[in-house]
Image: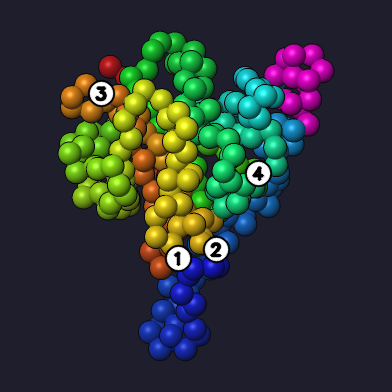
Amino acid sequence: MAGARRISLGEVVAGGAIAALAALVLWFAAPLAAESGDPNALWRIVHTLCATDMKVSGNPAPCTRVDLAKGYAVLKDIRGDTQLLLIPTDRVTGIEAPELLAPDAPNYFEDAWDSRPLFEARVGHAVPRGDLALAINSLYGRSQQQLHIHVDCVRVDVRDALAANQDRIGRRWAMLYAPLAGRRYEAMRLEGEDLGDRNPFKLLAEQPGARADMARETLAVIGARFRDGRPGFVLLSDRADPVTLDQGTAEDLMDHSCKVLRP
C-alpha cells in the first residue's frame, strides 16, 4: 500500500508480534472479503438500471433520483430506513479517483447535500442540518468499486462533541481536540447554507500528503449551525492506518438507526 511503512518479517519475529501480524492480515483482507460478493453491484444498478430507465422512460427506478445533466443518481441503501447513497452515473472508482480533483470536477458532496429533501421524505419531517452527515470511506474501508457518498443521520455523541468543540474548529485543517467514535479527526469549518463551488475532495487534497495518497483518506461533511446562528458545515478527515487498524471509515460517524431524530 502506498504511503504505509513496510513491516519486515524480522521486525515481526523480533517483537514477538504474531498477533499483530494476524491483525494486519485481517486489516488488508477485510475489504477484499467484502468485495468477494460483487464489488461492482452499485455500478451495475446505477449504470444498467437507473440511468438506462431514466433515459428510456424518465423513471429513475430502482433509484430515487437520476440527474443525467449533473451525472449522479441517488439510491436507497439496503441498510437502515433512511440511508441514501449519492453515486456518479459515470465510472468513478472512489475517493482516490484523479478526476475528482480535476478543475471541472463535479461537486458530488454538494449534490449529496442537495438530496436532503429525499432524505427528509423518508424521515417524514424536516431534519435540522446538524443532524445530517455525508461520508465517503477510504479504499481500505469500502466494499464497492464505484464512488458513493453515504447520506444519513450523524451519531448523537458525534453531534454533541462537535457542538461542544465548535470554537476549536477553524477555517483551516487542524486536529480536533476530542475523539469522534474512537478516532481522532482533522477538522475545518465552512460557512454558508450550501457548499456551492467549495469541493470537499479538493479541500481534503490540500492537506499535507493527502493528494499523494488519496486512497487512504476518508471524509465526512456534517451540517452545522454555529453559535452566532449562521449555517455551515464541519469537514472531518481521517487516514487509513494499518498500525492502528484504522480502515478509514468516516461512515462510523453515522447512525443508520437515526437515534438523533428520536424525541
Q: Give the class, few, some or many, for how many residues have Cα within 10 Å of label 2's Cα (few <14, many ≥20).
A: some
| Mark 2 → mark 4, Cα distance in angstroms | 22 Å
Residue furthest to the right in view is 56
Sequence-wise, the earlier of marks 3 and 1 is 3
Q: Which residue is mark 1?
A: 242
Tell me the number on the disc at residue 28.
Answer: 2
Asked whether the residues under the numbered discs 2 and 1 touch, taking CB atoms below 8 Å apart as contact, a structural biologist would say yes
Cα–Cα gap, marks 2 and 1 = 8 Å
Does the stretch in magenta take in 51?
A: yes
The answer to whether 126 appears left or right of 9 in the picture is left
| Residue 224 appears left or right of 211 | left
Q: Earlier in the sequence, mark 2 or mark 3?
A: 2
| Residue at the disc numbered 4 | 92
Magenta span contains residue 43: no
Question: Percent from the top left, x then y, of residue 100?
Answer: 57, 45
Q: Position of residue 84 (x, y in %)?
A: 53, 27
For the C terminus, which image quadrant? top left
Mark 2 vs 4, N-terminal side: 2
Q: Amino acid at mark 3?
A: Arg
Q: Secondary structure at mark 4?
A: loop
Q: Main secondary structure of the magenta part?
A: helix
* Neighbourhood count class around disc 3 (C-alpha, 10 Å): few under 14, some 14–19, many 20 upward: few
